[in-house]
Amino acid sequence: VLTSEKAIAQIGTPYIHDPSTIMECDGKYYTFGTGGGGLISEDGWTWNGGGVRPGGGAAPDAVKIGDRYLIAYSATGGGLGGGHSGKVLTMWNKTLDPNSPDFKYTEPIEVASSVNDEDCDAIDAGLLLDPTDGRLWLSYGTYFGFIRLVELDPATGKRMEGNKEIDIAIDCEATDLIYRDGWYYLLGTHGTCCDGPNSTYNIVVGRSPPNRSGTLRAFQSSRRSREDVMPL
């Protein structure tokens, strides 16, 4: 049986590029986007400007760890500024409410990088705090090479000492990681964007079971040569 329902758009001024995961803080909702700043909503439906994220850059993501919020964003990369050299940075805040006396971002920390001739772009950060063991993961990358995965320290937001990035996918961008019912999911966007009705952007997904230690390192099974890594 086919049915149709009227589509209803969000209201307010919900205009943002590359929005992050929506965060709840003290009864309000926040999302951040490319270029700095962000949106605030009291009900999750009506959005207006007012979110604050310094550093500029592109495609941020956010996650709550304990009583703090970790923000990851990219400086250049993705062809921005004419090249693919870039870096992913993280910073903390006790609150996302810019009117709170506790509102203050820490200095950004570099956790991943890329150079112009590298087969990966350090842009489009995606964060996952693994609910099974508390480990923190960052995915990043675009069409200009592999999607990569690194482990971060959930206490500091820094890259885990000695951690080596691994290639987990190709031919997509703007990835995000999700854990659900024993599986890890990697979502990415595929196709072309930013061309109005001619855009072909669509969301693709791949999944992996945990390995014997129950961690997201199961994605390491995909780390082979460029030709062997399957697109999502």
Image (tube, grey):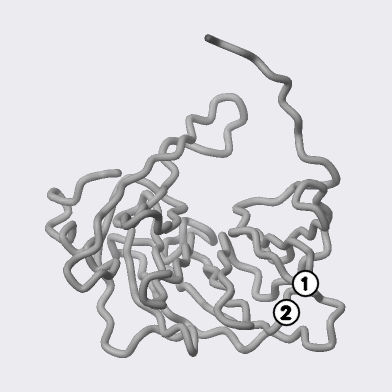
* Residue identifier under label 2: 95
Could you say which quadrant of the image residue 28 lies in?
Answer: bottom right
The type of residue carrying mark 1 is Asp
Looking at the rendered image, the quarter that the C terminus falls into is top left
Q: Residues within 10 Å of mark 1 (few under 14, many from 20)?
A: few
- Looking at the picture, how far across and down is residue 134, in whole percent? 41, 77
Q: Residue at x 78, y 88 (%)?
A: 102
- Looking at the picture, how far across and down is residue 92, in whole percent? 61, 83
The type of residue carrying mark 2 is Thr
Callout 2: SS: loop
Q: Nearer the viewer, residue 14 or 214?
A: 214
Q: Nearer the viewer, residue 138 or 80?
A: 138
Callout 1: SS: loop
The disc, 1 or 2, on the residue closer to the chain's N-terminal end is 1
Q: How many marks?
A: 2
- Looking at the picture, how far across and down is residue 110, in whole percent? 47, 82
* Residue identifier under label 1: 26
Asked whether disc 1 touches disc 2, contact meaning CB atoms under 8 Å apart, the reply is: yes
- Looking at the picture, how far across and down is residue 26, in whole percent? 77, 72
